Amino acid sequence: MHTILIAGILAVVPTNMEMAEDALVMALEELPAQLAALGASEVNVEVSGEHTGNWFIKQTVLSVLHESGITVTDWTDPEDPSMVLRIRPMELSVDYGGVSRPWIVGNKRVERIAKCELMSTLLDGDGEILFNLRTSGLRQDVVSWSETELLEGSTEWEWLSGELPQNSGGGILEPIVVTGVVASLVYLFYSSRAE
């Protein structure tokens, strides 16, 4: 029963990895057209930098380029050097924003924000830079606070699990207490004037 419930939640709400992939694909939207404009129908892809999600970035870049009809090679022929597309992630993460409730009472919800920013550089066979392109992608939604742990995935991918805002327990109680205090002050003010 518990497994069915988890599968049901994940079927409707995208996981953090799916959110990150959407933001990454948005950041890559301009790239195939730029490559085609320079006649780069075949490239060797390198992902640089220290981001722990570089494997994920390379996998997504390869998929986007393949769908666009660009051939990706994994080798360099010294007689016929291919162009190199170097991708450097400036940012790829899923973070959490504000906390809210749909009504006065109800499940606590949290804003989820997937951000991606990439620097793409195309080099010709001699290592000359043909273009630099800085792009970004952003995807946002709101999810139930209780679902966040299920949606984050593996704990070793910290870039998929941002820090949740502080869990304030007085979410419902606080407005009631403030309203009670204000009502008491108004009552005391008018009752003292009546005497």
Image: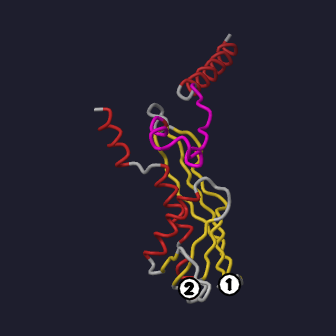
Q: Amino acid at mark 1?
A: Leu
The reply, left or right, for residue 118 in relation to residue 151 is right
Observer-nearest residue: 111 or 30? 30
Q: Residue furthest top?
A: 195
Q: Which residue is mark 2?
A: 40
Crowdedness near tag 2: few (<14), some (14–19) or many (≥20) residues, C-alpha within 10 Å: some
Q: Is residue 150 magenta?
A: yes
Mark seen at residue 130: 1
* Residue 169 position within the rendered picture, expressed as x and y whole percent measured from the top left: 57, 25
List x then y, in percent, for residue 26. 53, 67
Give the magenta range. 146-169
Quarter of the image containing the C terminus?
top right
Q: Secondary structure at mark 1?
A: strand
Q: Secondary structure at mark 2?
A: loop
The image shows residue 9 at horizontal and vertical percentages of 36, 43
Q: Amino acid at mark 2?
A: Ala
Front residue (pair 73, 22) = 73
Find residue 10 and report its horizontal and vertical position in percent.
38, 46
Residue beneath the point at 55% across and 48% down: 160
User: Of marks 1 and 2, which one's residue comes earlier in the chain?
Assistant: 2
Image disc number at residue 164: none
**Residue 8 quadrant:** top left
In this rendering, the answer to whether 115 lies above or below 143 is below
Residue sitting nearer the eye, 121 or 13: 121
Q: Is residue 6 magenta?
A: no
- Labelled pair 1, 2 in contact (Cβ < 8 Å): yes
Residue 69 sits in which quadrant? bottom left
Using the image as rendered, state which of residue 64 and residue 46 is in the foreground.
46
Residue at point 68%, 18% (across, down): 189
